[in-house]
Image: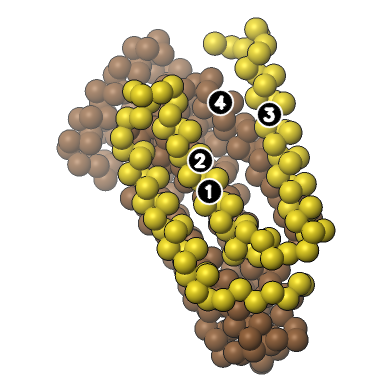
Amino acid sequence: MSEHIVSPKIYILIFAVLMVLTITTVYAATVDLNAYFHSLNVIVALVIATCKAILVILFFMHAYYSSKRTKLIVFAGFFWLAIMLSLTLGDYATRSWDVH
Amino acid sequence: MWIFLSTEILFFGGLFLTYTINRHTYADVFSFSSRTIKLSWGAINTVVLIGSSLTMAMSVWSAQVGRKKLVTFFLVATLVLGTVFLGIKGIEYHDKFVEHHVPGLNFDMYYCTNNPGACNLSPEDLAKEKVELDELTKKMGGENSVNANSQLFFSLYFGMTGLHALHMIIGAALLLWLIKQSMSGRFAAQYNTPVENVGLYWHFVDIVWIYLFPLLYLIDRH
């Protein structure tokens, strides 16, 4: 393991930001944002979740301080996920045999 | 460890994909079903689990700076928070059993509204649920299609949260193993790879929950 010691201050700061984001997403869910823009509630929830996930990956999981090789593997994992999601959903969205 | 986690990303990714497609296809029923899950337990569990990620990260730090007693302390704290999470999940599952929302035998979305007092719901919530349910039944053209589609939602709900809970249980077992070693002072500045790797696994499980929480509890709440 690459040895960069992350200080407790950073961990606590990240934890505090994650808590603020959690409160924000719960609050945002109670407001009807869809009235402003199609599916805005889902978009806001997923953007906040992604911000939280990125913070966890970069700091709790030390990806920010990792070697280039580790970063590549982290990136590759999510890249394959992106391929799976985008191609499948793209297919569903553009085919006429969709059930509805 | 990251290579293993990459396979886990796709493992859970497939479930998220299935959920997304079905939620889109059966939007009305999924939206109603997700509102029958209690938001408060999900929100509390999010805080608990992120808190356990903090204590896990702190135990990695303690090992790196050679504070052996602190390593054990933070590992135990992580285990306690993980157990609290599973306990709350158990309460939620119990509620769903009582409400007849578990797919399979006795599944009935109309159970609570047809049997007032049988479910742990306030009269206002029950009245609101009845109005929504009547509207939904009309829209879907009958109780059978509501039950069929909501059963799909709850199959995914139990499948996804169940798989997540299984990962937590495995994580808890790994923590016990780490605690045993750390009590004999094994982890210090020179050697702490097991703590680091179990930490990565634990944070990954946290990330899965970070997505499960909005998708299952939040997006249809307004």
Q: Residue at x 34, y 12 (%)?
A: B138
**Label 4 element class:** helix
Query: Residue tagged by mark 3?
Result: A86
Q: Amino acid at mark 3?
A: Ser
On whether disc 3 and disc 2 are found on a single subunit, the reply is yes
Mark carried by residue A51? 1
Q: Residue at x 55, y 45 (%)?
A: A50
Circles 2, 1 touching at the beta carbon (< 8 Å): yes
Q: Residue at x 66, y 92 (%)?
A: B184
How far apart are the two marked residues, 3 and 2, measured between alpha carbons? 16 Å
Left or right: where B114 falls relative to A40: left
Q: Disc 3 vs disc 2: which is toward the camera? A: 2
Sequence order check: which comes first, mark 3 or mark 2? Answer: 2
In the orientation shown, which residue stands out farthest toward the top?
A96
In this rendering, the answer to whether A12 lies above or below B85 is below
Q: Disc 3 vs disc 4: which is toward the camera? A: 3
How far apart are the two marked residues, 2 and 4, measured between alpha carbons? 21 Å
Query: Residue tagged by mark 4?
Result: B22
How far apart are the two marked residues, 2 and 1, measured between alpha carbons? 6 Å
Q: Amino acid at mark 2?
A: Val
Left or right: where B88 falls relative to B208: left
How far apart are the two marked residues, 3 and 1, measured between alpha carbons? 19 Å
- Residue A35 seen anywhere in this rendered image of the structure: yes
Query: Residue tagged by mark 2?
Result: A47
